Image (cartoon, rainbow, N blue to C red):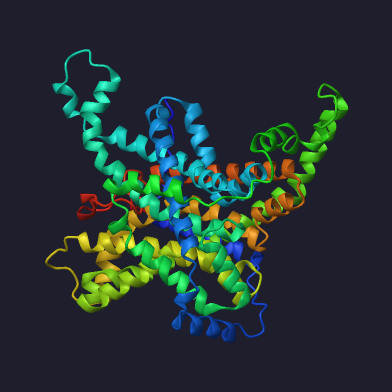
Amino acid sequence: MKHRRLVPPMIGYKRASWLFLGVAAMALPFADLKISVLEPGAELGRLFAGFTRPNFLAIDGRALVNTIAFAVLGVGLGGGGGFFLSFVFARSRLVRLFCAFVRSIHELFWALLLMQVFGLSPVTGVLAIALPYAGIFAKVYAEMIEESDRAAERVLPAGASAASVFLFARLPQLAGPFGDYALYRLECGLRSTLVLGFIGLPTIGFNLDSYFRQGNYAAAGALLLTFYGLIATRRLWARRVLFPFLIVTSLVVLPEGLTGGSALANLARFFGHDIVPAPFRNADPLSRDTWAALAGWLWRIVEFQIAPGAMRTLIVSQIALVAMAVLSLVLYPLICRRFAGAFGRPMGRALLVIVRSTPEYMLAYVLLQTLGPSMLPAIIALSLHNGAIVAYLMGRHADALDYRPDAPRRALDLYIFETTPRLYGQFLAYILYRWEIILRESAIFGILGVTTLGFYVDAAISELKLDVAVVLIFAVAALSIGVDIVSRKMRAALRIGGLPSRLSVEKLVPVFNKEPVGCKS
């Protein structure tokens, strides 16, 4: 008698949703959500009062130029590196692992390490952006190449080389999407460059840090409004035809930095001594005692830093993920024609664009000043920024829906029974894609004092224990890659892996006019 092999059921939308809600609920008792400032309302009042009376005379034009230059060069270098890596991305596991590693480490962590070699120099700022972005570009460009239409290849002569096939058949149709994605990444690069100013690089983030510490909210508000204007006008000044000009100009205007000695000598010291585990320095690498000391050294890092830091990073990220999901479901009608109308829709779009254009790190920084040190500012910052992104995308998809003639007329019924159910698969695709990004951001909030993994990384670098810092950064990368793997497996199980999941996707997939797939409980 043959036994039938039991196939586990597909996870389903409802089960996936309850799973995330359950994990967040279990994390809540362990989260530090206290407000330690005596009068947070008063501080927030002073903050908003300053923002309503911005002092534009306090803006440092040089810092603004530096912000653009770092972003243009970092994105340009990362895009160029990712472009060449994308050719072998699908065929080389080593390249895929390298790209996954570099993109799983936040720009701030790269900057803190690079500062040990290049100091507060332009090289630090540019490479801190270029390294993770190269991994991102390689993955995205490889996917675009894989999904491109190959019909044009049939008209090429038989035996054409791979380079000819790419140049004459694929590149003409990919040049537009490649350029569009690079320009979208430039917006991300501007946000990253602003954040790098908080650790000393001469961007507007450095001035923002100074103004916030001084309580000069009018100057800080002016800088932020200028930054929003820079983001809002990106399509005007950051065109594909102007990108070569921007790169050349950025090279010319880059500031001189404080290198702290010879970069080559610093590099030799960094790899030859600083990141070598302490038990291995001046010790016999073949000795059993050396390896025993190394094991004890690693175990202490795991027990007292990686384990508690990873747990708190997961707590922050899981609560923020669910808060972001709820917020995005509440906010997406703000930019829908059916719900917001002709008057409310532009205001909703402006609100969501402003919130998503504000880096999470800066939001958390401001909230820490007004609410006090705890996990609460980090969770609010993550949920607001990412919730605005997902809400913006969901609203665009809702406007693309082709409603049935018998669809509900009342706005609430239309939202609950028609629009949200049809968009729920796309909603989960966005949530799962943002999961790894939220975890990566949760780790860096440790630099602000939240006791996630970044807290221990920052402490190790401050104490010049770079060997410990490298181990901790590898732990951040491993945690990020692990979440990314789980996310991809869940998207595959839910059969939503082919749905768009990035903010840069301009064209909507026509699947939304069909019945949702995999919506079993």
Viewport quadrant of the C terminus? bottom left
Residue 91 visible in the displayed image:
yes
- Let me know if residue 496 appears in the view: no
Q: Is residue 307 left or right of residue 230?
A: right
Q: Look at 40% across and 57% down and name the residue there.
A: 14
Closest to the observer, 35 or 459: 459
Q: Judge whether 345 appears above or below 305 on screen.
A: below
Q: Residue 190 location, x and y as percent?
A: 44, 56
Front in this rendered view, residue 513 or 243: 243
Seen at 48% across and 27% down, the residue is: 93
Residue at image location 63% in from the left, 50% down from the top: 258
Q: Position of residue 453 (x, y in %)?
A: 65, 53
Which one is in front, 422 or 239?
Answer: 239
In the displayed structure, does residue 257 sit left or right of residue 463?
A: left
Quarter of the image holding residue 493? top left
Q: Is residue 306 above or below residue 102?
A: below
Tell me residue 157's x, y (percent).
16, 16
Which image quarter: residue 315? bottom right
